[in-house]
C-alpha cells in the first residue's frame, strides 16, 4: 500500500493585476504562504515541483534562489492549463513513492493584459505557395480550416455536446457565466468580484459564439502553492497541524486516449471521464458525496460538458442539471463557488493549485462569507488543452 | 497558367474536388496529417481514402476575435462526412446563428486564395447543401 498524502499547507495569492510583481515574486509569495500555513520551512521540503508557461522556464530554481537553495530535487513542469495540478501530482507521487515526507508544489503566471489566447499568430506569407508542416499547407490555416483560438475551440466543445444531447442554447451557456460571476462577489481574492445580469452577459462583446467576453476565463496574474506531507510524518506533527491537514483521497492525471475525430476537434471529455472514474475509485467516493466542485470553466461552454464528464449529472443531462440550479452555491452540487476561471481568474499555471486551495479552504471551515457549511469532501478538476487532465478529491481530516 | 495548388495536401483538386484521409491499414483510423504511426493501434502502414463531400455540421463557433491578420467573423465548423469528421469553415452563407445551425447539411466547396508567381491556390470550406 502506497503512502497516503495530505495537504499540510496551501496558499493562493490575490489574483488580478500585479504590475510590480514578476513571476518569481508571485511564486515566492505563494510558496512562503504555503510553508507558513503548513508550519514548516524550506529546510523541511525534500522535493520541489514548479510550473510556469510564459516566463521562459526554470521557475523552480529561480524560486529556490529567492526562498531557499537547499539542494533538493527540483522539477520544472509544463502541461498547458493543467500545469499547477501536474506540479502537485509530481510532489504527491514522490510522497507516495516514499522518496519524500514533505513536498512543495508551486504554480505562477503573469497573464494580465495578454489579451486573447489565440494559440498562434497568422503565418508570414511568402512570394510563392510553399507547402509546409504536417498538412502540407501553403498558407496559415488558423481562420481557414477552423480556429486555433481557445474561445473558439471550447465553444465548439460545448456546441458538440449540444448537437449530441440538445438543450445547449446561447442562453444556457450564459447562465453558467452568470452563476460564476455571482459566486465571485464573495471571494476577496478573485480578479473580478462583479455580478452581471444574463442580459449583460449575452450582450457583452462576442468573442467566439456562443462565448461572449464575460463567458471567457479572465487573464490575470497570480500564484498558488501547496505543501504536501506523508501520512506517517503527519502523525508526528502537532495536533493543530493534523486537524487542519486535508487528505488527498485521490490524485489523478490523464492524457487523452485515441478517439475517432479527437485530432480534428480536441476531445476534452474522454480523458476527464477517465480521470474522474479513477479518482472516485481511489477515494471510494461518488459524485453524490461531494460538497463542492471546482472545475475547469475556462469558458462557459466548457463548464457544461464537465458536469457530465465528472458524473455530476446523468449522461446527456448537463443542460437540465444546469437549469435546475443545482450548481449554484445553495444548490445540491455547488460548482465553482470561487467564481471560477471566468471571474476568479485564470493565471494558467496557478489554476491547478488555486482550485485545490479553494476546496481546502471550505473543508477547513475557513472560507468566511462563501463557506459551504459542513463541507467534508470536494473535487478539483483542470484541463490543459493538448490534453492533460488533473482530478483531485480532497477530504476533511477525521481528527 | 500553371496547375493550381491546394491549400492543404489532403485537398484533392480533380474534377470533383474532395478531401482525402490517410487510413491506417491495420485499424481503419483516419487522419489528415502526415503520420509517423497510428495513434490508435501503433500501425505504420497507411493507405488513402476519399472522404464524402456531403456531411452534417456537428459543431461550430462563430469567431469574432482571432489572431492579428486573420479576417473575422468566420464560422469554424466540424463536419461529419458520413463517419469521417473534418474541420472546415462554413462558407457562402452569413456568419450568424440564424444561418448556421447545428445539424445542418453541408457540402464541400472550394474558393480561390489568390495568385502567387503565376500560380493560383485553392482553399476549401463547407457550404449549406
Ligand atoms: Zn491503426
Image: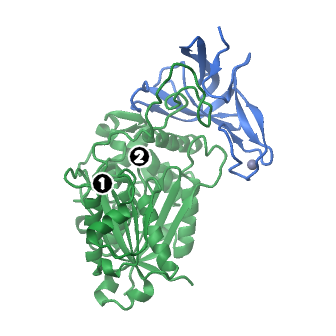
Chain colours: A green, B blue
> Local crowd at mark 2 within 10 Å, few (<14), some, or many (≥20)?
many
Judge whether A398 appears above or below A26 on screen: below
Residue A244's x, y, as percent? Answer: 32, 80
Judge whether A227 appears above or below A194 on screen: below
Question: Closer to the camera, B100 or A348?
Answer: A348
Quarter location, residue B16: top right
Question: Closer to the camera, B22 or A320?
Answer: B22
A150 sits left or right of B54 in the view: left
Q: Which residue is mark 1?
A: A344
Secondary element under disc 2, as helix, strand or loop, is loop
> Local crowd at mark 1 within 10 Å, few (<14), some, or many (≥20)?
many
Residue B84 visible from this viewpoint: yes
Q: Which residue is mark 2?
A: A299
A254 sits left or right of A375 in the view: right
Judge whether A273 appears above or below B93 on screen: below
Q: Return the mark for residue A314.
A: none
Amino acid at each position: 500500500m502506497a503512502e497516503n498524502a495530505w495537504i499540510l499547507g496551501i496558499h493562493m495569492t490575490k489574483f488580478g493585476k500585479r504590475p510590480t510583481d514578476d513571476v518569481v515574486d508571485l511564486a515566492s509569495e505563494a510558496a512562503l504562504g504555503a510553508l507558513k500555513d503548513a508550519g514548516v520551512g524550506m529546510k523541511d521540503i525534500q522535493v520541489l515541483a514548479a510550473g510556469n508557461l510564459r516566463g521562459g522556464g526554470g521557475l523552480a530554481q529561480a524560486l529556490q534562489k529567492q526562498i531557499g537553495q537547499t539542494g533538493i530535487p527540483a522539477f520544472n513542469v509544463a502541461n498547458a492549463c493543467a500545469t499547477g495540478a501536474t506540479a502537485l501530482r509530481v510532489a504527491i507521487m514522490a510522497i507516495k513513492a516514499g522518496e519524500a515526507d514533505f513536498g512543495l508544489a508551486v504554480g505562477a503566471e503573469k497573464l494580465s493584459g495578454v489579451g486573447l489566447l489565440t494559440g498562434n499568430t497568422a503565418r508570414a506569407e511568402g512570394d510563392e505557395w510553399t507547402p509546409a508542416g504536417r498538412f502540407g499547407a501553403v498558407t496559415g490555416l488558423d481562420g481557414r480550416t477552423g480556429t486555433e483560438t481557445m474561445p473558439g475551440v471550447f465553444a465548439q466543445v460545448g456546441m458538440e455536446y449540444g448537437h449530441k444531447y440538445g438543450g445547449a442554447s446561447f442562453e444556457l451557456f450564459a447562465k453558467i457565466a452568470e452563476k460564476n460571476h455571482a459566486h465571485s462577489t464573495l471571494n476577496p481574492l478573485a480578479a473580478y468580484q462583479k455580478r452581471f445580469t444574463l442580459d449583460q452577459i449575452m450582450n457583452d462583446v462576442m468573442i467566439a459564439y456562443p462565448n461572449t467576453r464575460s463567458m471567457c476565463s479572465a487573464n490575470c496574474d497570480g500564484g498558488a502553492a501547496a505543501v504536501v506531507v506523508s501520512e506517517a510524518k503527519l502523525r508526528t506533527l502537532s495536533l493543530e497541524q493534523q486537524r487542519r491537514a486535508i487528505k488527498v483521497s485521490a490524485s489523478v492525471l490523464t492524457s487523452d486516449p485515441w478517439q475517432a475525430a479527437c485530432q480534428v476537434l480536441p476531445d476534452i471529455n474522454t480523458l476527464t471521464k477517465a480521470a474522474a472514474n479513477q479518482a472516485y475509485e481511489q477515494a471510494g467516493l461518488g459524485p453524490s458525496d461531494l460538497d463542492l466542485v471546482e472545475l475547469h470553466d475556462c469558458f462557459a461552454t466548457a463548464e457544461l460538458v464537465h458536469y457530465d464528464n465528472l458524473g455530476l449529472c446523468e449522461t446527456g443531462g448537463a443542460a437540465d442539471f444546469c437549469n435546475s440550479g443545482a450548481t449554484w452555491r445553495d444548490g445540491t452540487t455547488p460548482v465553482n463557488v470561487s467564481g471560477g476561471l471566468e471571474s476568479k481568474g485564470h493565471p494558467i499555471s496557478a489554476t491547478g493549485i488555486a482550485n485545490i486551495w479553494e476546496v481546502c479552504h471550505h473543508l477547513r471551515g475557513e472560507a468566511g462569507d462563501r463557506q459551504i457549511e459542513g463541507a467534508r469532501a470536494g473535487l478539483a478538476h483542470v484541463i490543459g488543452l493538448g490534453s492533460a487532465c488533473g482530478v483531485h478529491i480532497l477530504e476533511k481530516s477525521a481528527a | 497558367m500553371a496547375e493550381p495548388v491546394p491549400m492543404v495536401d489532403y485537398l484533392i483538386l480533380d474534377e470533383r474536388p474532395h478531401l482525402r484521409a490517410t487510413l491506417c491499414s491495420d485499424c481503419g483510423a483516419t487522419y489528415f496529417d502526415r503520420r509517423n504511426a497510428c495513434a490508435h493501434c501503433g500501425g505504420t502502414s497507411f493507405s488513402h481514402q476519399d472522404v464524402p463531400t456531403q456531411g452534417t455540421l456537428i459543431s461550430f463557433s462563430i469567431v469574432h476575435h482571432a489572431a492579428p491578420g486573420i479576417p473575422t467573423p468566420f464560422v469554424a465548423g466540424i463536419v461529419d462526412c458520413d463517419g469521417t469528421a473534418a474541420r472546415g469553415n462554413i462558407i457562402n452563407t452569413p456568419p450568424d446563428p440564424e444561418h448556421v445551425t447545428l445539424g445542418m447539411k453541408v457540402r464541400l466547396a472550394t474558393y480561390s486564395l489568390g495568385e502567387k508567381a503565376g500560380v493560383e491556390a485553392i482553399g476549401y470550406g463547407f457550404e449549406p447543401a
